[in-house]
Image (tube, rainbow, N blue to C red):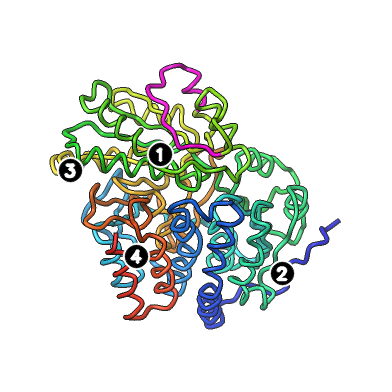
């Protein structure tokens, strides 16, 4: 029997109707953005956690605003550069406006597109089911917009029960689609999601969640013939390349790594989980001391996501010290049990270090690290000046959909102009498909890169004293670009 959940009754908008709907969505998101951030903070119990508000802007309304702007801008692929990587043509990611070049000064993103791959060939139309993630608030809404405006589907969205308090805000943000009966929300547990997936009117299912749920979906004979896609996390590696590393660059790398480990209390697949340092690296001890200090300077948080505490304790090998979990580093993991533990993502603010010859990095990652979503590469300025092509080869050798060089993989997730997902050649157990790919081509990987020490501290780092205000202003400017909004954003960003 079909579930007692109202499914959408109208098809996805097209042409001028879609353009008008996108404009209305920018207005509705503008009205919902502040409540979105504050509701999420309250639900997690983090209203007083330093920098958490900036994190919520960076992982909530801002990525949605940017994707709406990209959809309104239109689809297409920038011309190829005069170089190729690993047989792929290299294209610059689209920018949303001239302001991106200033607000993201020094940051860049490129797409690697394989030859003779015009598109995904995925079925479009019908009704799509979005099984939403419970960790990052932007994800279920981005997935809804993807289904509607990229795949032309009406959507029923079943958010995670962890986002029950967010549903009224989500509904406010998506009000034009709800009012048009193109999108509906369903509430309940996994059984509700299963019933919806089995509904014969549902033609596609997109999951962001655990690989166990993904296995249940793809081995369910009742779902044969439906378009099944999934993002199921990643045991994200961070590779430190050998070379001359001045102390100020070691300190910058330590600040970045600590911030990414601690982000969202560790409940994000963007967080580095396995740190690979070069064997016999002269600066290793100093760097690990710096990283330990940076982690200790960040606040411990009471986890909101189930399983985080157990994962933290498994990595640390001891009970948690109290209700709040501090972000931590476990050095020099050599035992086979630690290697085996990387085959399932440790979903906690805990980073494990493995030291091995740099030429073995790619083989180690391929053999031991679960997932193919994203990875980090850190290279000193001297290394980049001496062998930038070599650093590119290291990044391209990793089997991940997004690789960040000296910056945050969250840029690949949230720019709105870069695809996010696993490469097409990835083993199915690591997920399937990409989202936010508006190029019309199959993208093998996205590379985002920046100077290790940018001129202005990025607002997504805890060291930016005005991060929440800068990201809020940027969100509003992306939704309704004005000269005054741009100036306001720039002033907040520069007050770092």
Q: Which badge, 1 or 4, is on the more N-terminal residue?
A: 4
Report if the CB atoms under discs 2 and 4 are less than 8 Å apart. Answer: no
The span from disc 3 to disc 2 (Cα, nearest Å) is 53 Å
Cα gap from disc 1 to disc 4, whole angstroms: 23 Å
Q: What residue is shown with label 3?
A: 381
Q: Does the magenta stretch include residue 327?
A: yes
Verify whether residue 377 appears in magenta: no
Q: Quadrant of the N terminus?
A: bottom right
- Looking at the image, is mark 2 or mark 4 earlier in the sequence? 2
Residues 221 and 96: in front is 96
The secondary structure type at the circle numbered 1 is loop
> Disc 4 designates what residue?
94
Q: Which residue sits furthest right? A: 1
Residue at image position (52%, 29%) is 343
User: Is there CB contact under 8 Å for labels 3 and 2?
Assistant: no
Furthest toward the top, the residue is 335
Q: What stretch is highlighted in magenta?
A: 324-341
Residue in the picture at 66% in, 63% down: 167
- Could you say where residue 333 lies in the image, as x and y percent from the top left? 41, 21
Q: Is mark 2 on a helix, strand or loop?
A: loop
Side of 175 relative to 491 (left or right): right
Q: Mark 2 points at which residue?
A: 8
Q: Residue at x 36, y 53 (%)?
A: 113
Q: Name the front one of labels 3 and 2.
A: 3
């Amino acid at each position: 029997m079909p579930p007692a959940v109202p499914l959408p009754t109208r098809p996805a908008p097209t042409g001028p109707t879609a353009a008008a709907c996108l404009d209305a969505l920018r207005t509705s998101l503008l009205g919902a953005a502040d409540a979105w951030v504050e509701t999420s903070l309250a639900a997690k119990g983090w209203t007083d956690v330093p920098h958490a508000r900036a994190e919520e802007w960076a992982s909530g309304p801002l990525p949605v605003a940017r994707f709406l702007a990209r959809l309104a801008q239109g689809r297409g692929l920038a011309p190829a550069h005069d170089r190729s990587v690993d047989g792929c043509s290299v294209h610059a990611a689209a920018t949303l406006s001239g302001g991106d070049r200033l607000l993201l000064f020094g940051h860049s993103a490129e797409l690697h597109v394989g030859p003779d791959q015009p598109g995904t060939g995925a079925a479009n139309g019908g009704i799509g089911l979005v099984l939403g993630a419970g960790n990052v608030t932007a994800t279920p809404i981005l997935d809804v917009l993807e289904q509607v405006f990229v795949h032309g589907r009406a959507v029923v969205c079943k958010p995670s029960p962890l986002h029950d308090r967010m549903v009224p805000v989500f509904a406010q943000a998506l009000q034009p689609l709800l009012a048009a009966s193109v999108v509906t929300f369903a509430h309940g547990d996994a059984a509700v999601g299963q019933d919806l997936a089995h509904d014969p009117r549902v033609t596609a299912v997109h999951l962001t969640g655990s690989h166990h749920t993904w296995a249940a979906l793809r081995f369910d004979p009742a779902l044969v013939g439906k378009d099944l896609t999934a993002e199921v996390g990643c045991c994200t590696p961070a590779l430190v390349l050998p070379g001359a590393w001045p102390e100020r660059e070691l300190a910058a790398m330590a600040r970045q790594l600590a911030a990414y480990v601690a982000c969202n209390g560790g409940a994000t697949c963007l967080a580095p989980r396995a740190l690979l340092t070069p064997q016999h690296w002269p600066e290793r001890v100093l760097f690990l001391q710096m990283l330990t200090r940076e982690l200790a300077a960040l606040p411990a948080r009471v986890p909101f996501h189930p399983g985080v505490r157990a994962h933290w304790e498994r990595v640390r090998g001891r009970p948690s010290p109290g209700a709040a979990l501090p972000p931590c580093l476990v050095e020099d993991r050599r035992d086979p049990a630690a290697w085996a533990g990387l085959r399932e993502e440790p979903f906690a603010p805990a980073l494990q270090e493995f030291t091995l010859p740099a030429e073995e990095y790619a083989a180690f990652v391929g053999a031991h690290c679960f997932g193919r979503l994203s990875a980090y590469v850190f290279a000193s300025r001297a290394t980049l000046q001496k062998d930038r092509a070599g650093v590119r080869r290291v990044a391209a050798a990793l089997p991940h959909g997004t690789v960040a060089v000296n910056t945050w993989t969250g840029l690949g997730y949230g720019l709105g102009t870069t695809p996010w997902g696993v490469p097409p050649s990835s083993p199915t157990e690591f997920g399937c498909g990409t989202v936010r790919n508006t190029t019309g081509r199959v993208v093998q990987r996205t590379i985002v890169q920046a100077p290790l020490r940018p001129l202005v501290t990025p607002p997504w780092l805890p060291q930016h004293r005005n991060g929440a205000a800068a990201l809020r202003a940027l969100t509003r400017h992306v939704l309704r670009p004005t000269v005054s909004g741009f100036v306001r954003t720039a002033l907040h960003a520069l007050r770092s």
